[in-house]
Amino acid sequence: MAIESINNAPDSMSVIREKAANWIVLLEEADTAQQESLHRECEAWQTQNPKHRQIYKQMLQMWSAVEHKEKPRKKYRTVKNTLLALVGLIFFLQIPWQYITADYKTIAGEILAIELPDGSQAVLNTNSAINVNYTNDKREIKLVKGEVFVDVEKDARKFNIISEHLSAQALGTRYSVTNYANYTEVHVYESKVAVMPIDNKNDLTTLRSGQKATFNESNIIQQQVSSTDPDWVYGYLEFNNAALMDVVKQISEYHQGKIFISEELKDSDLRFTGILPLENANTAMKILADSLGLDVNTWTSHIVRLNKSEH
């Protein structure tokens, strides 16, 4: 099964931070005659991608907090390097080191398809990270965070996904592994997967096509029927008579910001059936609201509020 990446190849977060720093410093150093045109160009850059605006605003707030205007004006390179160092420190303190150094990772709203060295496919869900370790006698994926779906090519070497709680060895092709704080879920979509808890290697569970199970470090917690391939792999979420709060909770995982729900909607009995796209969480919220006769208020691209319609 060939899986194409949902996102085009945008700038990496480090490149976006570099460009945002350039804009802040250019505007800081510009004279009055240059300000208007530079502001227009900076705004155009921000509108190219929601990530541009998000990072630019974050860096501007952090730079303002340094109170650099009270100090003598510095040269361009010094100011820029100071800004990048400050932002880098904050990112380092907020994001786990394992995620930062992972071979492949996604941020909120991003889904990434990866072709592995043997031709197998791995797809990372939103806010996920993996390390890939291929040797002459094994194929191994370490799930650092989030969720990964794999479509495994036949090979003499064993194929394993390792999480904090278990090892899931492919005995066939398609399956996914989702890492949570206290447990890991394994979903099998084709053939079989042998699952072994990290702290109980004598307890081997074989899951077959159409099954999923939840494990902690020592044993299986729950086993139940699974489903077809996860819809997020193909860029959408499908709901069937789902409660409003459950729909919003899932969409919020793909939103680079905060989705608020009015108090009168939190206890409502509204339910949604339909398909919502994942490339733009704001678009998904608009479709949801239109379907249920609700209002969406967007203060910025990152702050959204869902309200009961006043009409």
Image (cartoon, grey):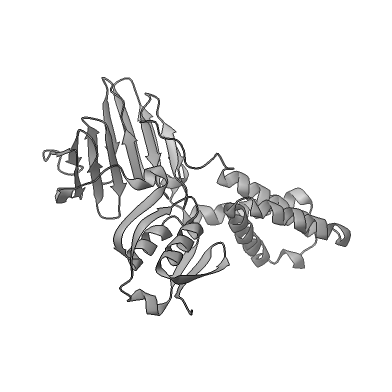
* Residue 62 coordinates in the image, percent (x, y): 62, 62
Residue at horizontal 45%, vertical 41%? 112
Q: How many numbered badges does the structure rendering display?
A: 0
View extreme (right): residue:
33
Q: For this rendering, which residue is in front, 74 or 94?
A: 94
- The percent coordinates of residue 168 (x first, y second) are 23, 38
| Residue at image point 26% right, 31% down | 173
x and y percentages locating residue 307 in the rendered image: 45, 74
Q: Is residue 222 above or below residue 119?
A: below
Is 126 left or right of 267, judged from the image as shown?
right
Please identify the quadrant where the N terminus is shown. top left
Residue 309 in the figure: left or right of residue 9: left
Identify which residue is drawn at 37% across, 52% down: 237
Kindly give the residue lying farthest to the left in the view shown. Answer: 202
Query: Residue 12 location in percent, x, y?
Result: 56, 43
Relative to the observer, which residue lies in front, 56 or 41? 41
On screen, residue 219 above or below 59: above
Q: Quadrant of residue 264?
A: bottom left
